[in-house]
Amino acid sequence: MSSAAATPATEVLLPGTVDPGGLQVRTRHLPPPATGRVLLRMDATGVSFAEQQMRRGKYYDQPPFPFVPGYDVVGTVVATGPGVDPALTGRRFAAVTKTGAWASLLHLDAADLVPVPDGVTAAAAETVAVNGVTAWQMLHRTAHVPHGATIVVLGANGGVGSTLVQLARHAGMTVIGTASTRHHDTVRRLGATPVDYRDPAVYRRIRDLAPHGVDAVFDHVGGPGLQDSWRLLRRGGVLVSYGTAATKDEDGNSRLPVLKLFARLALWNLLPNGRSAHFYNFWAGRRRPEAFRARLREDLTQVLALLADGTLTAQVAAEFPLREAAAALALAESRTVAGKVVIVP
């Protein structure tokens, strides 16, 4: 049980639709954790594409401004609330938060904590928290890609993409990955064949590498290129869409591009050509909290174990202290780095 004293916490606040430099740093006092909750000291959090969309007000289902961003966190329990095992204190865990993790301390439900294996650094674990679960679930729960398949990963140098490439290679798949030429060596080291995403003929280059089509395409870009991703599939192939990066800078309703995407995927699934299209939603099934948490815990535990045994290599693009979150966000948005930008205390 924690003491009754409030604890000061440093937080990074997203006040509205601002440039990265418009982020604000504040200090507020957190009360002791409530029943079923813990007080977690942040050891690492990160910058995902979600935060890049949120600062523009473009992330589907984001909370109203102002709020503290931060999609996931790795940290150490420093206090427990009523009904929580005090033995959790001092242990490290990962959790997916959606918002709130850009803080030195935060309250979390104890049921959302997933143990981090000994020997895995906080920064390394952070790179596979939401990214690792996303990659694992898309590959094994959504697409059900078989051993020996050939897949395409758009953005193979990114946080999700680099993890997805490694998981696919571990599962015996051939991977073609798009990235800018500066990241081709990284993509090769991960085990994929790189293709320049800036090449106007990028889809023809992929078709040259897989003339009979591919078994799956993982597309976070959306927009007009989604049609080209669909055309890459062989009969029985699966398209998994998990973002609308192509429209992130467009003005207007943040929900409209997603709704248009849903309609397009639904239409394609009506076509009698043996292919299928899916939109991956990390939060699908959350209306059944126990089942959602069990699935998340199982999948993140699998990914963390692969990180611990060396099957996965953490792709840390850079580390920034919490008070320099603005610089971390700007670097992540620059598209000049491979892997995930990590924020530390």
Image (tube, grey):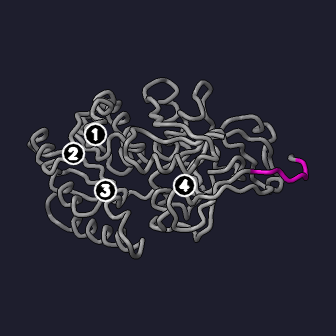
Which disc, if any, is residue 189?
none
Question: Which sits earlier in the primary sequence, circle 4 or circle 1?
Answer: 1
Question: Which sits earlier in the primary sequence, circle 1 or circle 2?
Answer: 1
Tag nearer the camera, 4 or 3: 3
Mark 1, secondary structure of its residue:
loop
Residue 5 belongs to the span the image colors magenta: yes
Q: Position of residue 18 (x, y in %)?
A: 52, 64
**Location of the C terminus (image quadrant):** top right
Amino acid on which disc 3 is placed: Val
Spatial distance from mark 4 to mark 2, Cα to Cα?
28 Å
Question: Which sits earlier in the primary sequence, circle 2 or circle 3?
Answer: 2
Residue picked out by circle 1: 146
Stretch of the chain drawn in magenta:
3-9
Residue drawn 58% across the image and 49% down it:
325
Q: Is the residue under label 3 in contact with that under label 1 (CB below 8 Å)? A: no
Residue neighbourhood size for the residue with mark 2, other residues' Cα within 10 Å, grouped as few (<14), some (14–19), many (≥20): many
Spatial distance from mark 4 to mark 3, Cα to Cα?
26 Å
Residue picked out by circle 2: 215
Q: Give residue 209's quadrant in the image.
A: top left
Amino acid on which disc 2 is placed: Asp
- Relative to residue 86, is residue 278 drawn left or right? left
Q: Nearer the viewer, residue 183 or 287?
A: 183
Residue picked out by circle 4: 292
Residue drawn 29% across the image and 36% down it:
182
Amino acid on which disc 1 is placed: Pro
Residue neighbourhood size for the residue with mark 3, other residues' Cα within 10 Å, grouped as few (<14), some (14–19), many (≥20): some
Residue drawn 80% across the image and 46% down it:
80
Please say whether residue 82 is visible from this viewpoint. Answer: no
